[in-house]
Structure formats: structure tokens, C-alpha cells
Image: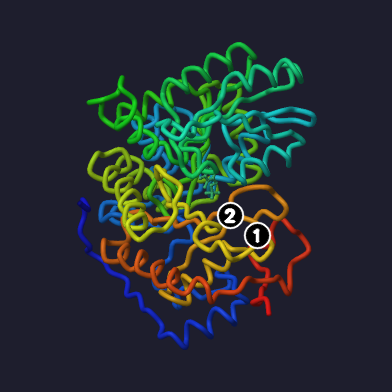
């Protein structure tokens, strides 16, 4: 059951079929090129696309826009201390700004940085500072309740191989975004803390989805049955020396981010780098009202009614899709449902982008915008052809989820008539091609 009701609404509109056909063709079969007003249900990302509460909007009116020493910053500081247990924070314009601040201070040329799985911006910031990102996920069993965990043995092996002195930081990303948003157990965070101590590395938690992770811990980790999500959230983060946060995720805001650190010297370094890249250390590239929205959003994120409806809505979409015979990655994670496009459209070969074909058809059939994470987004990588359906927070209702499932059914009925796609234009950097490349159906 949704634990909220609408007080402000935004009209959405399903263009008629002819318009949708024309729109997707004009977009070069790439949904990044669609205008949002032409999209009926937007599942492209849950980053900064959610709905703020009345309390967040009210707090924004109190935004103190002073360049230095703003009251809004103090309220954010208090909120982070209460909810996440970090007293020292450096604000940043969003998560990747926070990553630039922290990894720029921690990582240098020739270093190695292990992570359960690097999120793409994290990977880029490690590389940008001359480091080598190394993924150390557990080898998952299908019934494992914590498929996002780090494998501490892989970190020990890496340290033996490259020398512990070349590993400045160990990162654990909760939930594990690049592993379908799967959770990490508190026990795994304790194990990670232990390895970090053994190799004398700074233990960083990428906390962007810390509240979603805490909810999974409450549901699945025996020790925490009956604990509040707020208490689990603090416990999770208590093991870390530093955290990186995107306000666009579990601070329930449209923009913002910050770094949290315990060590005073590291704090000073991060603050200086923050001033250079983000802005003075009491605003970090944000307006006072953005700081206010995060301060309130963080507190809301760890309330049971909110987090339960958030994570359970993702599971609900997963169930509707399973009922419609759509192959999905199960169990669902914290923020999105991942569809196995190769199984759904078995006639389309990988070189003809089955995921991107499905994404185009979801728009054509139901005005639904999803995103491909397969051969089109990651050329030449041997990975499953997935389509991600991200649910923005507190935004859509049951009818919308039903519409999504019906759209899949309609696409499924026409699966034998669908043709593959080929790229007809792409930008110079292959890593960025899925944002702007244009495609056409194969003859
Ligand atoms: C979104 C995200 C980031 C980057 O945050 P932005 O606000 O998009 O810059 C980093 N790590 C994880 C796990 C994320 O989900």
C-alpha cells in the first residue's frame, strides 16, 4: 500500500499511436532523444526524478542562500549526523561531484581500488585519478539473499598481488547498483571493515541507496529482524571511514550530494578540494533550498512507511511482469526491475541489440521509456542483454505498473514481427554512444 497521497499533480499524456511511431523514428530509435512531454511513463532513471514531500517543499522556503555559514547547511549537517552518523560533511552538486572530491584526495597514479562492483561514475573517477578499479563481487548463488555482497577474499588476493600499500581505499556500494540493485548484508560490511584494517585502506561506503539497503537487511538478515530501518542505516554506515552520497537517490531530492568523513585530516583535504571543484564548503554548488530538501529527505528515507512502499513497489512491478511471462532478474533489487531482453526477444541476435529493440517497442506500444544495458550501452562486453525499468520514488501508482505490464504483453504478441536495429550514426566516444547514437531497423 502506498504510504502517501498526492497533493500536487503533474499531468502526463499518452501520445496516440501515430505520434509515438513518428517520435521514436525521429529519435533514431534512441529514447534519450525523446522529449519528456512525449513520454507517458518514464522509467529511464530514478536519479533525481522522484516526488518531494510537502515537508521538503516547505523547508525549501527556509533556504538560507548565504555564501558562507548558511543555516541550511547546518540543518543538513544535523540531519546527516542523526541519520548517517557522520559529523564532517563536504557538500557537492551531486554524487559524482562527491566522488571527485573524495577519490581525488584518496587515489593516485598506480593505485588499485577494489569495490563490490563499481558504479559507472565511480569507475570513471578512480580511472580519472590514475587508479585501477577492481570489481570484487561474491560469486552469487540464486537463492542468496545478499547478492550485492563483496567477496573479502578477492580483496585479500588483490592485496597479495599488487601490494596492500597500493590500495588506498576499499569501497562497498550499498545497494549494489551495477548488480541489479542487490543488497549487501551488515555482516558483509563488518567483513569489509576487517579487510580494510588488514590492508590499512580507507573504508568507503557508497551510500547512495543506504536506506533501500537497510530495508533489505531488516527483511532478510536474521540479526536485524525487528530493528528499525533507521537503526540499521546507522549500523551499516558505522563501519565506514567515509561515505559518498548522491542526494538524487536516498535523500529523496532532485539534486545534491555530499561526502562524509571521520578523520579530521582527510576532512580538511576533502574540504579544500570541494572548494576548488564544487563551491565553498557550506554550499557545494547547491542553493540553500537544495540543502534543505536533502536535510528533510534523508530523515524521510529511513521511515518504515516510506521505505517499505518504495522497495515493495519495485517488487510489485516485478510480480506483474512475471505474471505476464516477462523474464526478469529475480529477486528484484531496491530501485529497478531488470528484464532479460534476449529471452523476451529470442529472434533478435545480440549484434542487432535485442534490448534496444525492446526499449523502442515499449515506447511505440505504450509510451513507456526504459533504458538498455547491454550491447548498445556496453559495446563488446560479454554481459547479459538487460533492459532496466527504474521506478522514480513516490511517483507512480498501481495503474501505471499495470500499464507497463500490459505494454510488455502487447510487445510480446508481436515478437515474431520485430526486426533488429543497426547504428547509423554514433559519437566519437564509444563509451558515450548510447546517449546520442541513432539507429534504424535492419532491412
Ligand atoms: C547515482 C549514483 C552515483 C552518482 O551520483 P550522481 O548524483 O548521479 O552523480 C554514484 N554511485 C551510485 C551507487 C549511484 O547510484
The disc label shown at residue 384, or none: none
Comes first in the chain, label 2 or label 1: 1
Residue 100 visible? The answer is: yes
Query: Residue 372 sits in which quadrant?
Result: bottom right
Q: In the figure, 81 relative to 153: above or below?
A: below
Residue at screen point 52% across, 67% down: 359
* 383 to 83, vertically: above or below: below
**Circle 1 SS class:** helix
CA gap, disc 2 to disc 1?
8 Å
Q: Residue at x 73, y 53 (%)?
A: 380
CB within 8 Å, label 2 to label 1:
yes
Q: Position of residue 24 (x, y in %)?
A: 55, 78
Residue at screen point 73% across, 42% down: 128
Is disc 2's CB within 8 Å of ligand 1?
no
Q: Which secondary structure lies at badge 2?
A: loop
> Percent from the top left, x then y, of residue 60?
34, 54
Q: Residue 91: give x, y in percent of width and height.
A: 51, 41
- Marker count (numbered): 2
Image check: 119 left or right of 439?
Answer: left
Q: Which residue is mark 1?
A: 350
Write down the quadrant of residue 169 in the picture. Answer: top right
Residue annotated with mark 2: 385
Of residue 77 and residue 408, the one placed in the foreground of this image is 408
Amino acid at each position: 500500500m502506498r504510504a502517501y497521497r498526492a497533493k500536487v499533480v503533474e499531468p502526463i499524456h499518452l501520445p496516440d499511436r501515430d505520434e509515438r511511431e513518428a517520435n521514436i523514428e525521429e529519435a533514431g530509435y534512441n529514447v534519450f532523444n525523446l522529449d519528456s512531454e512525449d513520454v507517458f511513463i518514464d522509467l529511464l532513471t530514478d536519479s533525481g526524478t522522484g516526488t518531494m514531500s510537502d515537508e521538503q517543499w516547505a523547508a525549501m522556503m527556509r533556504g538560507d542562500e548565504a555564501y558562507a555559514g548558511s543555516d541550511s547547511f547546518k540543518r543538513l549537517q544535523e540531519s546527516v549526523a542523526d541519520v548517517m552518523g557522520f559529523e564532517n560533511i563536504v557538500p557537492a552538486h551531486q554524487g559524482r561531484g562527491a566522488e571527485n572530491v573524495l577519490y581525488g584526495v584518496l587515489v593516485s597514479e598506480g593505485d588499485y581500488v577494489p569495490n563490490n562492483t563499481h558504479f559507472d561514475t565511480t569507475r570513471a573517477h578512480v580511472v580519472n585519478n590514475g587508479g585501477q578499479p577492481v570489481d570484487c563481487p561474491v560469486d552469487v548463488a540464486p537463492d542468496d539473499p545478499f547478492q550485492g555482497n563483496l567477496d573479502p577474499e578477492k580483496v585479500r588476493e588483490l592485496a597479495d598481488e599488487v601490494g596492500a600499500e597500493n590500495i588506498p581505499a576499499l569501497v562497498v556500494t550499498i545497494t549494489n547498483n551495477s548488480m541489479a540493485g542487490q543488497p549487501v548484508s551488515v555482516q558483509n560490511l563488518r567483513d569489509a571493515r576487517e579487510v580494510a584494517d588488514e590492508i590499512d585502506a580507507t573504508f568507503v561506503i557508497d551510500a547512495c541507496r543506504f536506506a533501500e539497503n537497510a530495508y533489505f537487511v531488516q527483511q532478510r538478515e536474521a540479526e536485524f529482524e525487528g530493528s528499525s530501518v533507521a537503526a540499521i542505516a546507522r549500523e551499516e554506515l558505522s563501519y565506514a571511514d567515509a561515505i559518498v552520497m548522491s542526494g538524487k537517490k536516498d535523500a529523496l531530492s532532485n539534486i545534491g550530494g555530499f561526502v562524509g568523513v571521520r578523520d579530521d585530516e582527510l576532512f580538511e583535504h576533502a574540504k579544500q578540494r570541494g572548494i576548488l571543484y564544487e563551491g565553498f564548503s557550506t554550499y557545494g554548488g547547491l542553493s540553500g533550498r537544495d540543502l534543505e530538501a536533502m536535510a528533510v529527505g534523508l530523515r524521510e528515507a529511513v521511515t518504515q512507511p516510506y521505505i517499505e512502499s518504495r522497495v515493495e513497489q519495485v517488487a510489485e512491478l516485478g510480480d506483474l511482469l512475471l505474471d505476464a511471462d516477462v523474464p526478469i532478474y529475480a529477486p528484484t533489487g531496491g530501485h529497478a526491475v531488470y528484464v532479460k531482453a534476449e529471452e523476451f526477444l529470442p529472434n533478435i541476435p545480440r549484434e542487432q541489440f535485442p534490448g534496444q529493440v525492446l526499449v523502442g517497442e515499449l515506447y511505440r506500444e505504450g509510451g513507456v521509456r526504459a533504458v538498455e544495458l547491454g550491447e548498445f550501452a556496453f559495446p563488446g562486453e560479454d554481459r547479459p542483454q538487460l533492459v532496466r525499468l527504474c521506478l522514480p520514488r513516490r511517483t507512480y501508482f498501481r495503474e501505471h505498473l499495470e500499464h507497463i505490464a500490459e505494454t510488455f504483453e502487447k510487445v510480446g504478441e508481436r515478437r515474431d514481427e520485430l526486426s533488429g536495429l543497426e547504428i547509423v550514426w554514433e559519437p566519437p566516444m564509444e563509451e558515450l554512444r548510447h546517449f546520442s547514437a541513432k539507429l534504424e531497423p535492419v532491412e
